[in-house]
Amino acid sequence: MKKTYLRLLLIPFAVLVISWGLSSINTVDFSHYSTEGLELYFDVSEDTELFEEDNTEIFYYPFTGKSYMGFREALGYKESRGNYFVTNQLGYMGKYQFGKSTLHQLGIHDSSSFLKDPILQESAFKAYTASNKWYLRNEIKRYSGKYIGGVLVTESGILAAAHLAGPGNIRKFLRTGGAYTFEDANGASIRYYLRKFSGYDTSHIVGVKNAKVKRTA
């Protein structure tokens, strides 16, 4: 009996609370909370540059450090932002921006197939780096750790610069104490590559005279 009596008392009390709440909502002045005049969105300009090619130090693989993989990916990013399938306005192709004459030197004569084959491009990079290391072996031994033209010379810097300018131009630069200069069509110089790619571990690369890309059946 007591439980029934309590229930009868609670019902009108609940109705009273709900009614008071609804009436309170109706009397609240929301004009103070208007969003009129506020900018609630923004547009990103289509002209905004998200990357600064010469200033950024972020590459595709940020945890490779100064390893050989770090060297390879850093150079690939600088050349093409890591794009295996791009050809620039001067006809240089792929992730590492090889020219046709260099590909012929490596034993690759089908540039169309080369551009479609990332594995072949990585093999070409490995072979060309090995070839440059053999050609510049004496310069690597003689100049590593020294300052030439105001830049600290390292093995990885030499190999990267050789990829840019060719080993013959690197030899001239080093043997003239930096007096000989070279810049590509985009204004990249030997000094820039020596500095940017300094200190990577390329010690395990074995120099190979006239290295060719090995094809498997």
Image (spheres, helix red, strand yellow):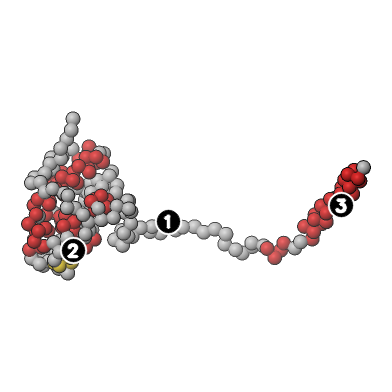
Determine whether, in the image, residue 57 is placed left or right of residue 111.
right
Label 1: which secondary element: loop
Q: From the viewer's side, name the closer residue of 112 and 208.
A: 208
Q: Name the foreground residue: 100 vs 212.
A: 212
**Left or right of 131 in this view: 14:** right
Give the amino acid at mark 3: Phe
Find residue 46 and name its label: 1
Q: Secondary structure at mark 3?
A: helix
Gap between marks 3 and 2 measured at Cα: 86 Å
Question: Marks 2 and 1, Cα distance to the nearest angstrom?
Answer: 34 Å
* 119 is higher (above) or lower (below) than 164: above
| Residue located at (33% from left, 53% from top) | 62
Residue 89 seen from this side: no
Q: Residues within 10 Å of mark 1 (few under 14, many from 20)?
A: few
Q: Where residue 90 appears, x then y in whole percent?
A: 21, 51
Query: What residue appears at the point 83 percent right and 56 percent down from the top-left corner?
Result: 20
Q: Residue at 38% of width from left, 57% of height from top?
A: 50
Q: Residue 13: which numbered mark, if any?
A: 3
- Residue 159: percent from the left, percent from the top? 16, 54
Q: Earlier in the sequence, mark 3 or mark 2?
A: 3
Instruction: Tell which circle, 2 or 1, labels the residue nearer the N-terminal end.
Output: 1
Q: From the viewer's side, name the closer residue of 56 and 104.
A: 56
The residue that mark 2 highlights is 191
Question: Disc 2 residue type?
Answer: Arg
Which amino acid, by three-letter code, is at mark 1? Glu
Question: In the rendered view, does 21 fall on the left or right side of 201?
Answer: right
Residue 178 rendering spot, x and y as whole percentages: 12, 66
Marks 3, 1: nearer the viewer: 3
